[in-house]
Amino acid sequence: MRSNRAILLAALLLLQSTVRSSFHGLSMINLVDLATSESLIATEIEKLSSKLLPVFPYLKNYLHDYRLSRGALDPWGVAGNPVAAYAMTSRYFYLLDKLKREIESGKVVQSAELSGLLELLRNIPLWPDDDDLFDVTKNIYKLQYFFDLRPEELVIGQIGKNETGISLSSKHILVLAGSAIEFEEFVAASEWLRLAKTKNISRWEAMWHRLVEQHDENYERKRTRGHRQLFETRL
């Protein structure tokens, strides 16, 4: 049994592995900068919520997700926690980028307050791209493989015996299952879908059929190569 300290150290090393060979990758410092910027952005969104939510209703989900997966972590705490880093990168990629584009397009009447929010969004030094989202998502699966951590633990922010005080919303369960299927991480996908079933999350059955179909298509072709994410038999 690996010690709690060893698991946390490995989690930090997993985050450091997000640095890609090109200079466009996210480093630990980049993640700290993103977490610092998001603190300011989320505060502004909260302050302007009465004006923003009627125009951008998805910001309600943004704030909910931010509170759940950020908790009381400081920027270094976010950067060193694979679950928090994944959730933050996802928010930047899907929600904050959308908000920036829609404000710039004139969807809402400009004001001094809104200009301040837009300036914060425009000043992000390195906006996460799809490769960055791929990296931090893969780190979640690495925690499953290397340390036998279950999705049931990861969604409540538990890494080993360490309670990190964060959690993932239900939407991330299906997102992580779907991404695992796309990345051909079939065993990991099955674990996330079993959790979705336990929580009675809609659409898990359709995604399970997708898992079975894609797994069995890959089974004959890859099983002789020792593909670690194939089951012993067809599903």
Image (cartoon, helix red, strand yellow):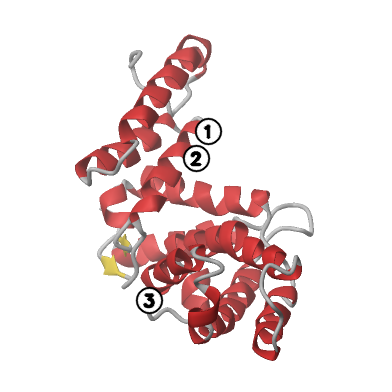
Q: Which residue is identified by label 3? A: 71
Task: Point out the image quarter for the C terminus.
Answer: top left
- Identify the residue at image location x=51%, y=71%: 54
The CA distance from mark 3 to mark 1 is: 29 Å
Residue at position x 68%, y 75% in the image = 121
Q: Is residue 12 left or right of residue 108?
A: left
Are the residues flagged by discs 2 and 1 in contact, CB closer than 8 Å? yes
- Residue at the (38%, 20%) spot, across then down: 212
Q: Is residue 184 left or right of residue 167?
A: right
Disc 2 marks a residue whose amino acid type is: Ser
User: Which of the numbered marks, if any, corresponds to residue 182?
Assistant: 1
Q: How many marks?
A: 3
Which residue lies at the image location 66% right of the left edge and 60% below the top edge?
A: 128
Q: Sort mark 3 into few (<14), some (14-19) or many (20+) by Cα contacts within 10 Å.
A: some
User: What residue would you read off at disc 2?
Assistant: 179
Disc on res. 141: none
Is residue 196 shown above or below 99? above
- Tell me where residue 13 appears, x and y as whole percent: 52, 60
Badge 3 amino acid: Gly
Residue closest to the eye, 127 or 11: 127
Callout 1, which amino acid?
Answer: Glu
Q: Give the SS element for disc 3.
A: loop
Label 2 neighbour load within 10 Å: few <14, some 14-19, many 20+: some
Q: Residue furthest right?
A: 23
